[in-house]
Image (cartoon, rainbow, N blue to C red):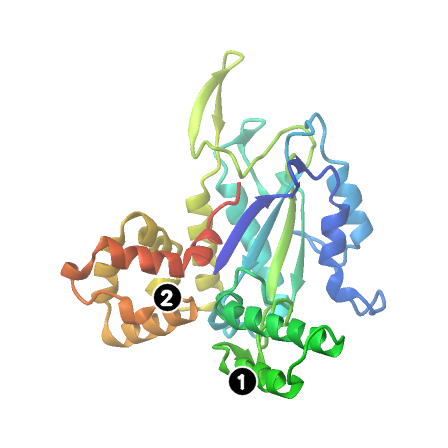
Amino acid sequence: MYITITPQKLGENYSQSSADFVQYLEKENEGLDSENGDFFFNQYEDKIGAKEVVQEIDGNTAKLKKIEPKFYSITVSPSKYELKRLQNSSEDLKRYTREVMRDYVSSFNREINGKPISIDDIKYYAKIEHQRTFKGSDIQIRENQPFAAKILELRKEIRTIQSGEKEGSIKDLERKIVKLEQEAPHRQNGKRIVRGMKKEGSQSHIHIIVSRKDASNSFSLSPGSKYKSSEVMMNGKLVRRGFDRDQFFTRAENTFDRTFGYQRNFVETYHARKEFIKNPNFYFSALLQLPTNEKTITFKLMREFGMPVQSIPTNSAQLALKVFNRLRRGVEVAIKSSSIGI
């Protein structure tokens, strides 16, 4: 499970409207009539149109400055193993989203009118998408890049021959391209994986737009707060503030496991990914103490996450910084996707 929370930025400035982001989330509805497309939904409604989402989010920004986020994007991406636990992908994820947003509000160390924040105090809209494309940060693209660069150079050379700028055998160059295409380490359906290619298999995930202001448009609720949990005197009153991101990520995992009966492996947990960064000795020690069957699954998952499993230390004496740094680089992107992108 990978969850990100990010403010929407355009360069150095925050988006002043949610229109572009909402339009982006409508991409899977292109070519479909209004009844067959996927709608936005919130805690209580199922069929909410894009126009209403923009109006509600953009109209809920009272007293926010241009240098402050107007809304946040939460992306919830279950793994293919987690998705296998679902009986009805769209309906199950919709139900899960509503529970996750309860975890979200409970992670605020805030009160509104003397009461803890409740689900009715926030304004959010969510949408489920079923497709993903390969991006430059994916390990498949990164490891295929040397082959892609060579193929690009060969194609340029072919064009110079075709234009008469130089002489050479186009057939020889084309054979080299075919060989490079076959040697690329990552392929899908017989083709080299390239940026923008749709990922095969179940790719369902959730996008959530949540307003920075509460539902009454009176209070600012920032999940990007640098305060985890604290109290401060403001205007003679004791005010609670902060957002506990660790609590949110952990509760979101537990909610999924409880809701769908999922048996989460050690390496899949948010806690494990944090320990990998902050306390590698503990991480590998815990990994090596797993039961044999769970350890086998763990190594399989680690390979899929892009970790060089052959370099995993087998005893405490091998927990060298060099080994750790190599492993850390291998999963840098995955680790980042588990943190708030603020």
Mark 2, secondary structure of its residue: loop
Q: Position of residue 77 (x, y in %)?
A: 54, 61
Q: Which residue does the image show at 62% across and 71% down from the upper left?
A: 152
Q: Which badge, 2 or 1, is on the more N-terminal residue?
A: 1
Residue type at mark 2 is: Met
| The furthest residue to the top | 236
The answer to which quarter of the image holds residue 314 is bottom left
Residue 246's x, y, as percent? Answer: 42, 45
Q: How many marks?
A: 2
Q: Secondary structure at mark 1?
A: helix
Q: Residue at x 44, y 68 (%)?
A: 261
Image coordinates of residue 23 in percent, x first then y, are 77, 54
Q: Which mark is residue 307?
A: 2
> What x and y, as percent, mark residue 220?
61, 31
Horizontal arrangement in the rendering, residue 243 relative to residue 158 (left or right): left
In this picture, is 321 found above or below 267? above
Residue 56: mark: none
Task: Say if residue 88 shows up in the picture.
Answer: no
Is residue 265 shown above or below 98? below
Q: Which residue bears the numbered disc 1?
A: 179
In terms of depth relative to the viewer, which is nearer, 158 or 272?
A: 158
Cα distance in 3D space between marks 2 and 1 = 27 Å
- In the displayed structure, 287 sits above or below 340; it is below
Q: Are marks 2 and 1 in contact (CB under 8 Å)?
A: no
Q: Amino acid at mark 1?
A: Lys
Identified at 85% across, 68% down, the residue is: 33
Crowding at mark 2 (Cα within 10 Å: few <14, some 14-19, many 20+): many
Is residue 204 visible in this depiction of the protein? yes
